[in-house]
Amino acid sequence: MVIAFIFTAYFFLLTLLEILSALNLFDFKGGMLMNAFVLGTITATFLKGLVVKKDSYQLVASLIAAAFSALTILVYLASGSFSYGIFGFIAVPYAVKKLRNKK
């Protein structure tokens, strides 16, 4: 459950940074509100897993975070548009570990 709390706090921080950059507050530039919505969804899924104490929510949230991170990396390479969703790759080791334990 410690991992769920850490991931919830981490993705909440990324969501706030994305919102600040989308609104151009405090000289953060380049964010989009749609990216903030996806990061907020990931945060809510981790929070739901923390509340109900089920690993399946954490696994799904980490898979969504990994997919979103891969997409934002590709967008950054194609257009140079930065998003804080790139830092979602930190959830990949957790997803790989949980998927290996499912077999």
Image: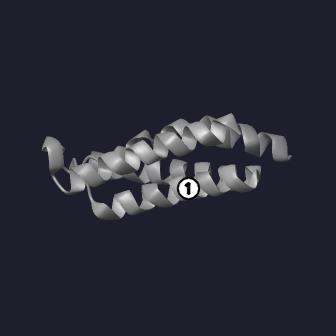
**Residue at x 18% of width, y 44% of height:** 28
Q: Position of residue 97 (x, y in %)?
A: 72, 37
Q: Nearer the viewer, residue 83 or 13?
A: 13
For the image shown, how many numbered marks are present on the structure?
1
Residue drawn at (75%, 42%) of the image: 98
Q: Residue at x 60, y 51 (%)?
A: 46
Say left or right for 74 vs 91. left
Question: Which is nearer the eye, 63 or 41?
Answer: 41
From this view, report whether residue 13 is shown above or below residue 34.
above
Q: Where does the N terminus fall, quadrant-wise?
A: top right
Name the colour scheme: one colour
- Quadrant position of residue 56: bottom right
Residue 101: x and y in percent read: 82, 41
Q: Quadrant of residue 23?
A: bottom left
- Left or right side of 97 for 12: left
| 37 over 72 or under it: above or below | below
Q: Position of residue 85 (x, y in %)?
A: 39, 48
Which quadrant of the structure image shows residue 19? bottom left
For this rendering, which residue is in front, 95 or 22? 22
Q: Does dot 1 land on a helix, a strand or a loop?
A: helix
Q: Amino acid at mark 1?
A: Ile
Tell which residue pokes out farthest to the front in this image. Answer: 51
**Residue 85 appears in the picture as rendered:** no
| Disc 1: CA contacts within 10 A as few (<14), some (14-19) or many (>=20) | many
Between 30 and 11, the one nearer to me in the picture: 11
Residue at the spot 45% in from the left edge and 58% down from the top edge: 40
Horizontal relation, residue 12 to residue 20: left or right: right
> Is residue 24 at all visible to an observer of this figure?
yes
* Residue that carries the numbered disc 1 in the rendered image: 64
